[in-house]
């Protein structure tokens, strides 16, 4: 990641006609750096249940909702909790605090049939693919929603109860660390592994690869437009969810 950032800085320097940037980038391009091995950790449904219970017990029900969304809906952390970005970011936001604005899931993105529609941050500037999720097929999410009064479902979905504002990255990480410790989750399992746990459970349940790709929001290598790609996205999520739930019942 550091090397990627450095290369981006050098590219900007080249555009600004800064001396030495072009030569440095050429030299850097010839270097080969060892890559980190892929992570293999994939938390189970039982571990997510324990994490959610620990978060709720600590007064962080919204964090428990985020964990449920990450695991059962295969959402990335920043798509589930949202993220604070500089005011210079061109994306619109109605949540502003101390020189930053927040981008993330709002309650208004869930319709009357409990279908959540959102555009992953990673695809917002690329394919523009939208993900649709039937939350009725996600018992963990439904369980968390049952504890949230309808009249309070306004604005951001995941809000820090201590501040009344969406979690910051550090605050969300602190809550995760405490919940994981309480739930007895091994230290080598990170919050970002919840998405991997979703994919792993889906594969073990023999969910179709194409369905999993749609649920994960993957469009790499395809020239199909987002509009065409999304036609069967909601049904894909329902099929994957059904396969995963069937696998849990077998246990």
Image (cartoon, rainbow, N blue to C red):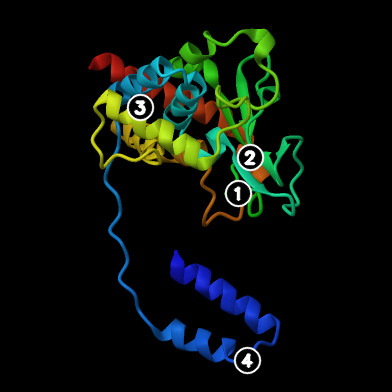
Which numbered mark, 1 or 3, is in the foreground of this view? 3
> Cα distance, mark 4 to mark 2?
40 Å
For label 4, the SS is loop
Q: Which residue, given by chain and number where applicable, does mark 4 sit on?
A: 19
Count residues near mark 1 (Cα–Cα under 10 Å), then give few for <14, some for 14-19, many for 20+.
Answer: some
Does residue 217 lie above or below 19 as drawn? above
Query: Mark number for residue 123?
Result: 1
> Cα distance, mark 2 to mark 3?
28 Å
For label 3, the SS is helix
Residue 48: give x, y in percent of width and height. Answer: 34, 25
Residue at left 60%, top 27%?
163
For label 2, the SS is loop
Q: Nearer the viewer, residue 47 or 246?
A: 47
Residue at left 71%, top 82%?
16
Residue 246: give x, y in percent of width and height. Answer: 33, 18
Q: Which residue, given by chain and number where applicable, does mark 3 sit on?
A: 179
């Amino acid at each position: 990641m550091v090397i990627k950032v450095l290369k981006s800085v050098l590219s900007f320097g080249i555009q600004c006609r800064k001396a030495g940037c072009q030569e440095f980038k050429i030299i850097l391009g010839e270097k080969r750096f060892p890559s980190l091995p892929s992570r293999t950790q994939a938390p189970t449904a039982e571990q997510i249940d324990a994490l959610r219970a620990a978060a709720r017990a600590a007064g962080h029900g919204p964090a428990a909702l985020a964990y449920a969304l990450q695991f059962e809906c295969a959402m990335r952390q920043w798509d589930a909790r949202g993220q604070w970005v500089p005011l210079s970011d061109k994306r619109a936001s109605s949540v502003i605090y101390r020189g930053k604005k927040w981008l993330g899931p709002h309650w208004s993105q869930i319709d009357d049939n409990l279908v959540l529609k959102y555009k992953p941050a990673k695809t917002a500037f690329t394919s523009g693919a939208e993900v649709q999720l039937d939350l009725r097929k996600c018992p963990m999410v439904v369980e968390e929603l049952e504890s949230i009064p309808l009249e309070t479902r306004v604005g951001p979905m995941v809000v820090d109860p201590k501040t009344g504002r969406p979690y910051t990255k550090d605050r969300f990480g602190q809550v995760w660390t405490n919940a994981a410790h309480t739930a007895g989750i091994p230290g080598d399992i990170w919050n970002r592994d919840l998405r991997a746990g979703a994919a792993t459970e889906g594969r073990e349940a023999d969910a179709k690869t194409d369905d999993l790709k749609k649920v994960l929001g993957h469009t790499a290598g395809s020239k199909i437009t987002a509009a065409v790609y999304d036609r069967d996205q909601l049904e894909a999520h329902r099929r994957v969810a059904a396969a995963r739930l069937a696998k849990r019942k077998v246990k």
